[in-house]
Amino acid sequence: MTTPLRPSFGTGTDQRIAGGELIIDIDALKANYRALARLSAPAVTAGVVKANAYGLGLDVIVPALLSEGCQRFFVAMPDEGIAVRSYAPDAAIFVLSGLYRREVADLYAQHRLTPVLNSPRDVSIWEAHCGAIGHRAPCAVHVDTGMNRLGMTVAEALSLAEENSLTQALDIALVMSHLACADQADHPLNAQQLQSFQQVRAAFPGVESSLANSAAVLFGKDFHHEMTRPGIALYAGLPVDTSDQGVHAPVVTVTARVVQLRTASAGVGVGYGATPLARDSRLAVAAIGYADGYPRALSSADVHLRGVRAAGGFGFLHGRRVPVIGRVTMDLTIFDVTDVGADVQPNDQIELIGPNISIHDVAAAAGTIPYEILTSLGSRFHRRIVGA
Ligand SMILES: *Cc1c(COP(=O)(O)O)cnc(C)c1O
């Protein structure tokens, strides 16, 4: 007897009826963490798990990183930190986006989250909070060294260092900054930010410090300080060839189910906007679309979207590249399978990201970055965890 179908919309649909699969290879994730930790040593390697671990799920990613010895996590928002706490009872959890108001400080205390103080205003909120609870709960200090996003100025950090050395009002566990151009290794701002950061950390003797995201782990020891903070390299590797350093294992595979096959003649139109076919074609209609995070920008090379000529997405099926034909729609995308030798059948799964199609190539074809592809993946996939 077969197991009855268990539809569970939005929480990882039954594999037999889901439009596609999101497969997460936990062994690959762990291998990437180990490689980054090796490159970072003796600095410790934190795990950046904001945005639900870049869309992959805190429930699987946090326990896997913990099992590799990761004991420091970074999230963007307080409620993400609370979720991480439920999987990591003893880890340090840093919340990047600040405090914004006094009541939030109580929430931090309740879940032992470490706020990243981004401004003198954040500093006074946390000082008042520590005064009220009668002990100095740890905090981190974020210094803006040139990105002009989050963080206090270098001057503000230096005066905080001086003041706190007298008052000891704050227990500062970490001083951090973030690079604006780490994806361009030879950008002059990297060296400038490093120099400003060295000045700041010298003012906080005995306090751990951290500057490097994934890309900056490869910049070498000068950028590692006491802690590195990789995110994307855990999940997608790095866009540069780091296979010799072990940071390359593809963690994510995305596939889409073929729901209908059809043949159509040269010249007829396909999909919205009726993109004309260049040849007699065999077409596979797959149950994935922009509502699943498969970007409309991956519509076929001939489609004009808002005046921008798309580069054209493609999938991989039975050992062949299969191009997207026509427009990616909300729930469906059409692939040209004419050149696939094997017999394509309904229920076949077309690989869209995976061993044959890197997420970096998908992102480039869509005119975006792997971060956006990962964090946009929708809730209709069957999520399958392999490895571990
Ligand atoms: C997102 C983020 C990171 C991780 O960056 P990756 O490029 O994904 O490695 C590190 N630090 C801060 C402050 C961040 O916002």
Image: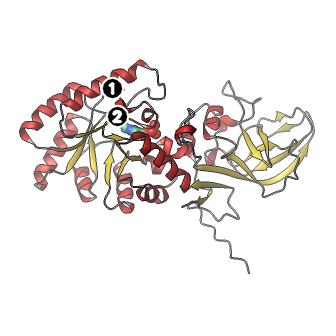
Q: Are marks 2 and 1 in contact (CB under 8 Å)?
A: yes
Q: Which residue is mark 1?
A: 194
Horizontal arrangement in the rendering, residue 12 relative to residue 131 (left or right): right
Look at the picture and state if 148 lies above or below 84: above
Look at the picture and state if 14 lies above or below 40: below
Q: Can residue 96 be spotted in the picture?
A: yes
Q: Amino acid type of disc 2?
A: Leu
Q: Residue at x 31, y 36 (%)?
A: 225
Q: Earlier in the sequence, mark 2 or mark 1?
A: 1
Looking at the rendered image, the quarter that the N terminus falls into is bottom right
Look at the picture and state if 161 lies above or below 137: above
Say which element carries label 2.
loop
Q: Position of residue 60 (x, y in %)?
A: 49, 59
Instruction: Determine crowd level at label 1: few under 14, some 14-19, many 20+ residues with C-alpha closer than 10 A.
Output: many
Q: Which residue is mark 2?
A: 211
Q: Residue at x 46, y 48 (%)?
A: 33
Q: Residue at x 75, y 45 (%)?
A: 316
Q: Amino acid type of disc 1?
A: Leu
Say which element carries label 1.
helix
Horizontal arrangement in the rendering, residue 351 relative to residue 318 (left or right): left
